[in-house]
Amino acid sequence: MEFVATLLPCQSLSLPYIGKGYRHSWHIDIDTDPSSTQGEMPANIPPTEGHSTLTTIPSVDKPSSIPSYAASHPEKRKPPNITTPTSLQLSQSAEARSKTDQPQHGEKEIPNNPLFPPLPIYDSSTSRRVKSSLLRSVSFVLALGCLSLVAVLATFKTIGAITKDVFFRLTFRDPDKKRPFYEEEKRRKNQRAIEEKGWNKKKADTERDAGHDEFVPTEGGPDPIVCDVSYYARRVGLDVEFLEVQTEDGFIIDLWHVYDPSEYKPMSESQRAARGPEVWTGSGPSRPFDFSGKKPKFPVLLIHGLLQSSGTFCVNDDDSLAFFLCKVGYDVWLGNNRCGFKPKHSFLKTRDPRMWNWTPREMGIRDLPALTSRVLSETGFSKLGFIGHSQGTTQTFIALSKDQRPELGEKLSVFCALSPAVYAGPLIQRFYFKFMTMLSERLFHLVFGIHAFIPLMMPMHEVMPGHLFGMFGYRMYRYLFDWSDTRWDRGLRDRMFQFAPVYVSSESMRWWLGRECFAKQKCILSTREEGLEEDRLDGSDLSSIPTSTDSAQRPNMKLARAWYNGQVPPIAIWVAGSDLLVDGRKLLNRFNRGREPHARIVHQRVIEDYEHLDVLWAMDAIEKVGKEVRDVLWMTCDVRDKVRVPRGCEEVESWRDHGVKGPRSEIILSGKQVMFWN
């Protein structure tokens, strides 16, 4: 173990809460990175307290000393004049901050937040790079062994399912007949076959059909099963343009814009390029607005879940959530978290462990503001509608909390949370997850490395045929997360797994499954002790609580333990009732019991038969989720008189925000009775 210890980071970055009332205490000696020609500093240096934009690298001569991606790519944009801090300046800056951040006389030192423990610090010395390369080789072998074991176990489970299927067919029975959408699934399969055969003729008649059909497909025929969201958009008469966005800590992330080609002209390559790292600067769009005499569409941003990309919103043809929202009249943008399919950074290389030193917290306080800022800049709006799925809700709930980046809430008209990943479900007790929870930090880094988490999955994605990778991906996810395709269209299943997995950091997976954070605390913003106390109060008779904590002091207790302040946007929640991965009901219970006095729940629904991914991929997801999301986005839109009315929302009334949650009332949303707060 002494040899192993020399390979692993021995320092940690003390980074408690970001926000008012919390101090940062650290001392960092920063060396310039020899791999960087400009000598930029690591991406894991904490921001100074009270810095409104949370810029990771301290400012010396300019508002931000992180070089823009476009500056290092002159073919995309003329590089700005950027001053990069020297090693001495950075060391002096860190020393000055460490002095000013020490508790003053009479002040209490704020402990680290156990939910966001210190991140490792990696220097840029030659010995560190050699050790990192060696650790990368060791972890590759060990992680490959873990992946192989899971593949073997998944195969054994698959053999049982195949055996049952064969037995049914040998006894002249259809094993699929009990599927809930059996007849509809057959109808769609036959319809796709007819359309594929007739595509060549239809392609020749496209120009004639354009006058009759509003959305004319420009791709068709047999599905080649590709990892290309624009291809699947063109199959339904839409298209996608790809933008790059730079975060405040230097990552270059992808932003996809879904549009109707009959009324929108895509931006040029230079206009789609990444800008500087500053957010919410009020800068205008990449080009002048042109709505051709029509009112603009209200912008909506979607964020994906763990190990996925936002392509998951685009795999069900016209029943895809992104395509549905675009066709009814929203301006749809798909955000992707850092690294994704092609990791990019303004100055760090993929072999540098500092590029992988992040967790869902960084996705929330860095990636979300960058994506939100770019969408608002390109569209000219002050707010947008936001939709998150699974981990997309995790990073958002973290970012919106009063101790992280609550000002993000002022940019969102509503936060639609699909399968919210806030509380852990019973699946966390499975033996393979418990094994990962038992690993110490050093052992976790030894097995899974300090770079990408099991990166072998990505080369496999590139070389394996689409159908084979889709089948393999489904079996692996099915075994690990206990998902099933019961409510999905099996004819599209292989396509669904073309947009997963993506690159994620081992540090991020350690946050989810390691022994310190989510797997231990069972929540993203409360400790296990706080969760047990809430359960005790929920199960007790309120009249038995001592009077000292009953009447006048109870609101103060709620505020003290609340996650959010008055900046939190309205929230709508869709819970999958049969979800074993996360516990959405517990989140609803937190809101409904008034533990978040500032939260305004405009819509909540539990769909009993749904599993974790069914909110996106179930054959009836548009009816049960999509149309309600459409209505909630319009109900909370603050500029209804200035934008187009989405189809189907003509009778949806505006939500009245009174600021403080009051008695429950009922409204009719998409023909269903739902609850909201007056």
Image: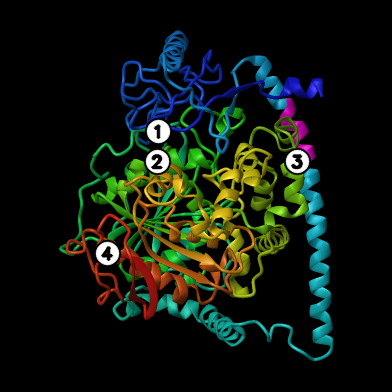
The picture places residue 135, in percent across and down from the top left corner, at: 73, 28
Q: Secondary structure at mark 2?
A: loop
**Labelled disc at residue 8:** none
**Labelled disc at residue 402:** 2
The residues bearing labels 2 and 1 have C-alpha atoms spaced at a distance of 7 Å
Query: Toward the viewer: 57 or 471?
Result: 57
Say whether marks 3 and 2 touch (CB < 8 Å). Answer: no
Which callout, 3 or 2, points to the residue nearer the camera? Answer: 2
The residues bearing labels 3 and 2 have C-alpha atoms spaced at a distance of 31 Å
Q: Which is the main secondary structure of the residues drawn in magenta?
A: helix
- Which residue does the numbered mark 1 point to in the structure image? 19
Nearer-N-terminus badge (1/3) = 1
Horizontal placement of 122 versus 414: left or right? right
**What's the amino acid at mark 2?**
Lys
The residues bearing labels 1 and 3 have C-alpha atoms spaced at a distance of 32 Å
Q: Secondary structure at mark 4?
A: loop
**What's the amino acid at mark 4?**
Glu
Question: Is the N terminus in the top left, top right, bottom left or bottom right quadrant?
Answer: top right
Task: Verify whether residue 50 appears in magenta.
Answer: no
The picture places residue 673, in percent across and down from the top left corner, at: 39, 77
The residues bearing labels 1 and 4 have C-alpha atoms spaced at a distance of 43 Å
Local crowd size for mark 1, using a 10 Å CA cut-off: few (<14), some (14–19), many (≥20): some
Local crowd size for mark 3, using a 10 Å CA cut-off: few (<14), some (14–19), many (≥20): some
Nearer-N-terminus badge (1/4) = 1
What residue range appears in magenta?
134-142
Q: Secondary structure at mark 3?
A: helix
- Which residue does the numbered mark 3 point to in the structure image? 438
Q: Quadrant of residue 664?
A: bottom left
**What's the amino acid at mark 1?**
Gly
Say whether marks 2 and 1 touch (CB < 8 Å). Answer: yes
